[in-house]
Structure formats: C-alpha cells, structure tokens
Amino acid sequence: MIKALKVVMIIWAAIAILLGLAYIFFPTQLCEMGGETGAPAWVAYVFGLLGICYITAGAFVIVAARNPLKHIMWVQFAITVAILIVVMGAYSIMRGIVTFSQEGMPLIFNAVFAALFLGLYPYKAAKKGS
C-alpha cells in the first residue's frame, strides 16, 4: 500500500510541476485555452507566481514520496491541496465564474487523486508514528 501511495504522490507531483512550468512559460496560451483573449499583462505575472507554487509543492511531494511515513505531513498537504482545488473549482463553476469546460479537468483530476490519497493513506502507521 505504501508503494502505491509513493507512485500516486509522484504522479500527482510530476503533473503539478509540468502545470507549473506551463503557467510560467505559456500563460497566454493557457488563457486562450480557457476562452480568455486579451488578458492584461499582469496575468502572466500572477500565472508565473502560481507556477512557482506548483513547481515547489511538486518537488517537495516527490522528495517526500521516498518515505511517506517519515514525511506524513506532505501526504496530508497533497490531500488538502487536492480537496481544496476540487472545492474551489466546484464553487467557481456554481457561481458562474468559470464553466465546466474550463475547470472540469482540474476538478476531476484532483477529485480522483484526493480519493486515491485518502484510500492509500496509512492511517494506522501514521497514528503509530505520531
């Protein structure tokens, strides 16, 4: 079960790093893919900051995946981030801020990974270690 958790953590983190790189190097294209054209120049700056956050978090989760029991708080971090992305995505869709076609993939992706993280979480081993 720990091996599966390690794999899930690495996959989730690697995708976060790739997304972070995309936010840094392709902000205009990402805006256009989301249906927004002519975004102000500062959007690229904000996307760059978001990209840095994704890359940093992904890197630390990959390092933590080497020994999830020792770094259980990083497992909890990944669970929390995945759940909060789902909540924010669903809230934004319900409010009409974004459409499902814009936010559906990140919402589904993070819902699946949140479920995987929760299903593979080492509840008994994590409780013993604390």
Image (cartoon, grey):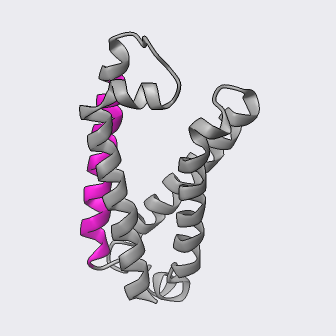
Q: Nearer the viewer, residue 17 or 36?
A: 36
Question: Does 80 sit left or right of 67 as displayed?
Answer: right
Q: On the image, which quarter does residue 11 sit in?
A: bottom left
Vertical placement of residue 120 versus 94, above or below: below
Q: Is residue 7 magenta?
A: no
Spot occupied by residue 80 in the image (x, y as percentages of width and height): 53, 56
Q: Nearer the viewer, residue 95 or 123?
A: 95
For image coordinates 36% across by 28% down, the residue present is 29
For image coordinates 45% across by 60% down, the residue present is 78
Spot occupied by residue 39 in the image (x, y as percentages of width and height): 42, 13
Give the position of the C terminus as an image quadrant.
bottom left
Vertical placement of residue 98 versus 65, above or below: above
> Magenta: predominant secondary structure element?
helix
Vertical placement of residue 8 versus 123, above or below: above
Q: On the image, which quarter does residue 74 sit in?
A: bottom left
Spot occupied by residue 94 in the image (x, y as percentages of width and height): 75, 35
Q: Is residue 47 magenta?
A: yes
**Residue range highlighted in magenta:** 46-66
Question: Does 74 sit left or right of 87 as displayed?
Answer: left
